[in-house]
Structure formats: C-alpha cells, structure tokens
Image: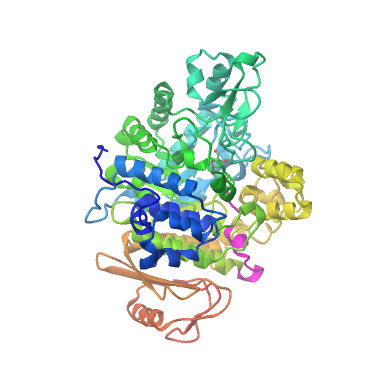
Amino acid sequence: MGRQVSINHYTINSSIGRVLKTPLGADLLGSFLRQAGLLHLRRVIFNPLVKQLPFKALSLLAPDKIDNDLLSMMCRKINTYAQTETIPPDAAEIRETWWKEAVCYQIYPRSFFDSDGDGVGDIPGITAKLDYLQNLGIDIIWLSPVYDSPEDDNGYDIRNYYTILPRFGSMQDFETLLQGVHKRGMKLIMDMVINHTSDEHAWFQKAVEDNNSPYHNYYIFRPGDTSPPNNWRSLFSGSAWSPVSTGSDRKSAEQYLHLFSRKQPDLNWECAAMREELYRMIRWWLDKGVDGFRFDVINFISKEEGLPNGNEKLGELTGFTGIENYLFGPRVHQYLQELRRETFARYDVTTVGECQGLGSEMMRYFVHEARQELDMSFNFDHVDPPGAERLKGYVYDLNDLKQLFISQTETWGNSSWNAVFLENHDTPRMADKVGVSEELRDHFAKMMGGLQLSFRGTPFLFQGQEIGMGNPGFESMDEIRDMESLNYYKEKLAEGADEDALKAGIFFGSRDNSRTPLSWSDEEQAGFTQGQPWIRVNANFRQRNVAKQEKDMHSVLSFYKRMIALRKERRELVYGEYHFYGAAQRNVFAYGREYKGQSSLVVMNLSDKPLRLPRSVRRALEAAQKKAETALSNYEEEPRTRPLLTLRPYEFRIYC
Ligand code: TEU
C-alpha cells in the first residue's frame, strides 16, 4: 500500500464522533466497552450530543477503567493507521471463488481417530476417515499442527517445520493423506504457527548457545537475569519474559519474550533473514501441494518498537498487560503483504488468519481483497460474552451473537470476506456455554448448524460439532491436560483463590472441553482408540456418536448433511445480501438472503421457550412458504398453525 500524506491527526481533544469515524477508533472503543462490561454505554456514546465532546471525556464515564493514558494510546494507534494504511473502495460486486463456497472442517489430530492404539489420534487415522468427511460434504480440511513438537501446547510449539511428529505418523503418511484428500476433490490447509516456535527449535537452541550467532536475532532477547524487561503478561499466566536458562555468566544473562508459554519464544519479525527462512519453508509446503494455511495468532507478529510497558488499566481489564503493543503492531500489514508476495500469491490456495482482538471494521485492513494480505480472518468477539472470562464461567446469551453477526455484515462490504466459526479447539462447546438442557441439545445443535451454514462467510465446523458433542463434564483436575488451565490453576491457587470455585471455572472453561476424542461409536473409548486415550472420552458416547447418527435420518449429523448440501445448491446462502426481520426483538433471529434473483428465508428462536413472532417476520414467512421449493427445519413434527405464529424452543426453519 502506498503511503498517504494525511492531514488526519487524532488527540484526546478530538471529538468522540471524529475518533469513532475511523475503523480503529470504532473497533477499539467497541471492544473496550465489551471487555469492560460497559456495552450499555454504547447508546450514550453514540448520542449526537455526546459525540461532540472531546475524546478525553470518556474517562469520566468509567474513571476506574479508562484514563487519559489509555485514550492517548488509542489515539497514537489511530494516527499510525490513518497515516500509513487505507481501506480501498469496495468492488461493485462480490467476486465468486471456490474458497468462499467451501465448507471447512477443523481436525484436531490428537483427538480425531487413533489408528495404532497408542491413545493419540494420528494421520493414518484421518486418512481412514476421509470418506466420512466427504459424505458429510466437507470441501476443505483444516489440520491443527502435526509438525514435530515437544507438545507443550499440543503442537502449537513447533520444533521442526519440515517434519511430522512421529506419534502422528511419517511424512509418507502425510503425503498419503494429502493424496486421499485430493482424490476426493477436497482440499487441505495446514495450521501454520509463525508468531513463535518451540524453545526446542534449532534456531532457538543456537540463539541461546551463542549471542553472536545469526539466530540470536531470530528471537526477542533483552539483557537481565532477574526482573523482566517490561510488564507484559503471557497469555498463559505469569510474565511474558523468562530468563535464558543456560546463562551462568552474569554479563550475558538474558531474558526472552514469549507471549504464550515459556516453551514458545516469539520470533523476531524485524529480522529479514528469519522472515526469509519462514517464507522458504512455507513455499516448501506449497510445493508439496497443500491448499493453504490457517495462520496462528498472525495479528500478533509485529511488536511496538522499544517494547514499552503496557497500560496498567488495559492490563487489568484484559488480563494481558502489554497487549496494545502487539495487537495492530506497527508493521503487521507490511509483513502480511510480504508474506503473501513471497509465498502463496503465486498459488491457487486460501488463507485464514487467526486474529484475536480484531473487530469487523479493522478486519477490512487484513482481508480486503485489494490489500493483498489474507483471504479471511477468524474474529473472536462472539466467542465469549461481553466482559466475561472463560476460566471463571459464564452464561452465553445468543442475542449477543446475533447482534455481532448483524453488525459484522454491515461492515464487510463486497471486498472483504470472513470465516464463520462457532467452535474450535480453544473454547468449550457452544451448548454448554449457553447451558442447554439435555432434551433440547439436538434441536440446539441443529439450529446452530443451520445458522452457521446459512450465513455469509466461509463456515468452519469443528470436529464433533456435526453430532452435537458437548463438554465432557470434567470432575477432577487429574482429567485436565491443557497447560493454559494448569498454569492458571497454579497461579490462582498461589494467589489464594477459593479452590472449589477455581476448579468449577476450569471445568467449565478449559480448552480441554473441546479437545476430547470424537465419539465415533458406542464401542469402548467411543471407538476412538484401541488403547488408553490421552484425555478422557465424553461420558455420553453411547448415546451420542457418529455410527448411531449415521443410521438416523433425524440426527444432528443428518441435518448437517442436508444443510451443507443446501448451501451448495443455493448460492444466495453463500453470496446473498441480507435483509433482517424483527432484529430488535430478543430471541428472534430472522433474515432473508438474496442473490441473482434467488432468495431464501431463515427464522430462528434463540431461546428455550416458545417464541411469538413479530408481524414483520410472520409476513416474510408467509411469503416465503408460498413460493418455497425446499424447506428444512430442526423439528420432525410440522408446526400446528399456518401461517406460523410461534416458534418452538430453538426452532430453526429455512425456506428456499
Ligand atoms: O490461540 C491463540 C489465542 O490467543 C487463544 O485462542 C488462546 O487459546 C487463548 O485465548 C489463551 O487465553 C492460538 C491457538 O489456537 C492455540 O491453541 C494456541 O495455544 C495459541 O495460539 C498459541 O500458539
């Protein structure tokens, strides 16, 4: 992107309205209010009179959470963006392409299918199940990391980018998998973790052995052996700095930066030689024939120059002091454009960036087609409720998801595309976040699938979602494997937290909740392994499993198959414009989609109680029912009234 001479300059004396007009201002403030549990203030801030007040007046609204320092920091970031980045105008029409039409499926290899009885899922296990995925209608598989790794963070700590972790299989096994995928007309994208490596990666080993080695500049070191060089906190508890353990010589003692665990040192993206090594490696995978990448925490790669201390108030609020120094870092776009140019630009592949902290306005800087960075991003605003902490437990309100999804569609425009997900390996199962009762679980699972598969954006399903798997119901800390949960437990206990409450939060929110083995059948260990699984299987696998649901035309799995097939038949479900009905009314989620003369209507009841439909929705429904060629719902029995006046608990209906 060419640099732009700009007269835009924002300070804490600029009006709130002016700041809100910038994408970064709108998003920063939006996510700030969300995180601070101050969403109710949105109304106040968007009031035309309030908008005329200076930006610094915001600190009066919540003095304990907002200070001038924080607001100045926001302005600095906004200025940097305003001076260096632009969002090009939108194309007149959406560009049609394969990865927008695809349905994707995330495989967490450790827990998908174990072919050799060691209790850990593996690559031949995935190959064995390709027909299953093809039958389901999957086009693209996203494979969580299978590279060589000491598995401190289940493979998100890569020791060698060019080899496969032996317990997952060999490179030959990987190639067989890739062939099997391609033979079935499907594609495979790799997880690519390049914000950090494992501390056991040869680069890091050489870097700590010898300060003068060229590899020393591949990571981020600062002198000192006692106190950390700044106040940044790791996303996995404690300081983001650890001393290099080999340094016995005081003068050469150093600390290294790790935003995640101490076994995941951050790479120094300022180092051109390091970037070149990464690009070479990515080209190597492309030449092997992979169809793209999911880039792990890719919006964290550029760190603020000088690594300044993080704002304390923001630290308290987010739990991650320092975050403003790597979220929207100064060179992130330069790096992303270079990454694309040097690697995937010349291949017909697709990319999705994991972009925690990215709102729907800022997203356009990352995925606008004319900017040549990424194809799609995973945004996280909808993953947890406003102001809530996963490891403390919460009740998720689907109305919040609805509001976010609606507002996102307003900002995307024709040139930005997104990935739509409801579950992944980092968050508990949706039904448990919402607290759905046992008897409504199937209806709920189908409704969520219906929503995801009728929305604009490429759907990414997470393994188990297609059979409505829930959390396993952990009961003891011995069952927990995830280092994030274990570190958190240790840290909070040491701080004097109440043990029962602490455990309850972890059993609810641990990432392990979605990492238990896929329930394949009612055989021992859910048919996942002949051995002892690395983590327990879900207790209800005899009732809820793939084999059983394959035989039942009313199962969650059968519903997913039908919904996926429908999405492929009806292009308006992929590309269509939206018209929302009754959006202001709680628990009503209804939209029409229209594209090139074809239209569909979706109606949902987001609650577990019967819902009376507002008139606008009833009218739209009546019209859609009259002309519909296909109708699909998550209830076997037809509704009693026609036209429809009420929806049953978690009822989903689509008319095309
Ligand atoms: O996750 C990044 C990330 O920030 C989170 O979703 C994270 O799991 C959580 O917020 C921590 O509080 C990615 C991967 O998806 C995750 O599995 C890895 O652990 C992490 O990066 C580090 O590579």
Determine if residue 155 is in view: yes
Up the image or down, 106 lies above or below 444; here it is above
Q: Quadrant of the N terminus?
A: top left
Q: Position of residue 554 (x, y in %)?
A: 54, 68
413 to the left or right of 73: left
Q: Quadrant of the C terminus?
A: bottom left
Up the image or down, 246 lies above or below 242; here it is above
Q: In the orientation shown, which residue stands out farthest toward the left?
A: 92
Q: Position of residue 366 (x, y in %)?
A: 36, 44
433 in the magenta segment? yes
Ligand 1: give its quadrant. top right
Q: Position of residue 346 (x, y in %)?
A: 30, 34
Q: Which image quadrant is residue 298 in?
A: top left
**Which residues fall within the magenta stretch?**
425-440
Determine if residue 425 is in view: no
Up the image or down, 517 lies above or below 607; here it is above
